[in-house]
Amino acid sequence: MAPEGAFKNRAKTGATLEEVARHAGVSPATVSRCLNSPDLVRPALKSKVEAAIRLLDYVPHGGARSLASRRSRMIGAIFPILDTTLFGRTLEALQQEVGEAGYTLVVASYGYDLEREQHHVRNLLTSGIDALVLVGGIRDDSVYRLIERNGVPYVLIWISESDGERPCIGFDNAEAARRAARHLLDMGHSRIGVISGFVKDNDRAAARIAGTRSALAEQGLTLDESLVLERPFGSTEGREAFRLLMTRRPRPTAVICGSEPFAYGALFEAQALGLKVPDEVSITGFDDFWLAAQMTPGLTTVRTPQSEMGRLAGRHLLSVLAGEEAVPPSPLDVELIVRGSTGPPPADAP
């Protein structure tokens, strides 16, 4: 019997060109022309074929998939961005894991634009990938149907669960943020600001804000929405957001940054404003990149399992491709790393 929660390799059951032709009421040659030379096909026929393709979630196989094995030895991975600061460790560990097994990793990015992500999914399926890695769980169900109808195993990373329906390898983002917020609350902070990535189409950022709210609620406090700023990821954006937070009255005595580059920018801007960290304001980060320990003061941050997610995602997909039962792990651990950027609020804080 398969272990509970196991995800087994599925047969390649995607629609065929012949099925598209039958559904559209045209010949397979017409479907082929629509795909390869659409200008040579009458608009009415092309419309029928395109409708059948959408209905059947048809993806034409790449050249390698015409082989009897229907294996390309390629695994796709689509990341929000390819900034090595944010996803570099995960990407490197994933590449090493699948590369050692003889697979090539094909990588794309979508700039947090889910329409672009869907375009990349279709292109990678067309190219004949054998498996796929996606970040987060928020996307239209049609994307999952497209992947599943073409029998391509996939795994979601950077989240710990997706209603139990889809394999996930990651950590509890809300709990990670709660740990940072509880640390500040335990030191006496009550007015806390947040610098976050945009929560639209980003379940990780949304969960981190939710975790902060939850920690405050445990103490009978609420998160002041005027102190929650959403920005594109980056240290420059962190500086600008921190500067704006410091104009609020009363200003926050601590700032939780939902991404490490935000925290670097906040520390730089605090120095530029002449604010002493942590005597006048505390700052926390998220991820614990190498620079966090080198800052002055060192950055208090949440250490996330970046490399582990990449390794385990690769191993999971390789197991599925080998026809084995693969059970994704329980949520991975995170750790609060306390350094010099956090301390009690100033004595004259309201």
Image (spheres, rainbow, N blue to C red):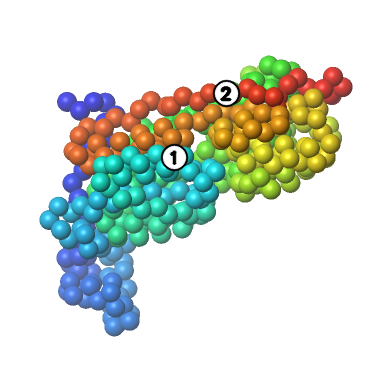
With 110 as the anchor, is 34 left or right in this view?
A: left
The residue furthest left is 68
> Quadrant of residue 213 in the image?
top right
Q: Which of the pair 298/108 is nearer the observer?
A: 298
SS assignment at label 2 = strand
Mark drawn on residue 90: 1
The quarter holding residue 347 reads: top right
Q: Residue at point 17% right, 25% down?
A: 1
Q: Residue at x 82, y 22 (%)?
A: 346
Of 341 and 244, nearer the camera is: 341
**Residue type beneath disc 1:** Thr
172 vs 81, nearest the viewer: 81
Label number found at residue 336: 2
Q: Amino acid at mark 2?
A: Leu
Q: Residue at x 73, y 28 (%)?
A: 282
Mark 2 Cα shell of 10 Å, populated few (<14), some (14-19), many (≥20):
many
For residue 342, side relative to residue 61 (left or right): right
Quadrant where the C terminus sits is: top right
Q: Is residue 332 visible?
A: yes
